[in-house]
Image (tube, rainbow, N blue to C red):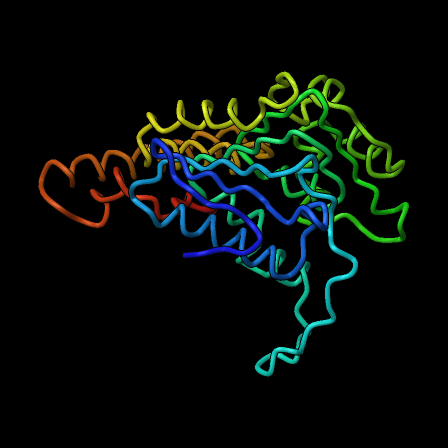
Amino acid sequence: MSYELLRYHVEDRVAVIAYDRQERRNAWSLAMVREVMAAVRQANADDEVAAIVLTHEGPVFCAGSDVKDGPHPRDPATGVRPNMATESMADGASWPQLLVDSKPFVAAVDGPALGAGATQLLSADLRIVGEGAVFSFPFLAFAAMPELGSTGLLARLVGFGRAAEIIYTSRQLDAREALEIGLVNRVVPAGEARAQGIAAARQLTSIPALQFRLTKGLMHANFLEEDISQVVRNEMSAFRTLFRAMKAQKGGPSEEGSMLKGHAPVKVEAKS
């Protein structure tokens, strides 16, 4: 599949997706959202890919939503006029859900990540940034509102108090402060985020696919679960899925057995 607004290639089982819309500071337009989501789906569907890195060309990771994009023609089936928000926050097919269901996903940022450029990072498994990276959630300052699940995801990473202060004041955070509060996982010398991100993703390729998916599902399902018995039940459910898959693989091909090398989303059983 070819792309106009980003670059896509695979190296050592790592799919590298790099924004390349530098004339608009890699701002998210409807077309760009569609391309990056298609690229993530392509990587997830490719058995030769075991991890994904999202990065960028040019000095800016993503300057947010492109305010000059659109308006676009209404969808004749729904009557809805599509835009960046309707595409990235579609019910059951949103950007955050895509990343939660994804193979190991690493964001490598070496410049400003503003607005949607910052919120899109919150669903990544790892965030590796260069010294010059800055982050901002300036929605209220522009009479807008935060999106892409950030009203829940940001607090999970940095705590409710910090998340509220960051969103309410719209202030910028540099890379070091982002690391100190838990917004990012690692700060590296300027210019090295992409290489370090690919190296981190390559490490994750050694993890068996099903074990990673089940563990990732448990992390998301159990993070805010107050009932420890439910946490354990979720873990037991995941173990049963793993053991059934291992048994099926020994006995011959089956849907469950194929999970050990496949990449379909694995869900933890919901609370009854």
Question: Looking at this view, is 21 or 215 the one in front?
Answer: 21
75 w.r.t. 11: above or below? below
Q: Quadrant of the rendered structure where residue 80 is? A: bottom right
Q: Residue at x 17, y 48 (%)?
A: 254
Relative image position of residue 66 (x, y in whole percent): 74, 55
Q: Quadrant of residue 68?
A: bottom right
Answer with left or right where residue 78 lies relative to residue 10.
right
Q: Which residue in the rendered view is the most extreme toward the bottom?
A: 76
| Residue at (39, 46) in percent of width and height | 44
Q: Looking at the picture, does residue 157 appear above or below residue 80?
A: above
The residue drawn where x is 42% and y is 42% is 9
Number of residue marks: 0
Q: Nearer the viewer, residue 26 or 200?
A: 26
Q: Position of residue 28 (x, y in %)?
A: 67, 52
User: In the shown orientation, is residue 108 left or right of residue 254?
Assistant: right
**Image quarter hosting the N terminus:** bottom left
Residue 22, percent across and down?
A: 67, 46
The answer to whether residue 154 is above or below residue 42 is above
Q: Is residue 181 left or right of residue 102?
A: right
The outermost residue toward the left is 251
Q: Position of residue 105 (x, y in %)?
A: 49, 36
Give whichever of 251, 79 is nearer the camera.
Answer: 79
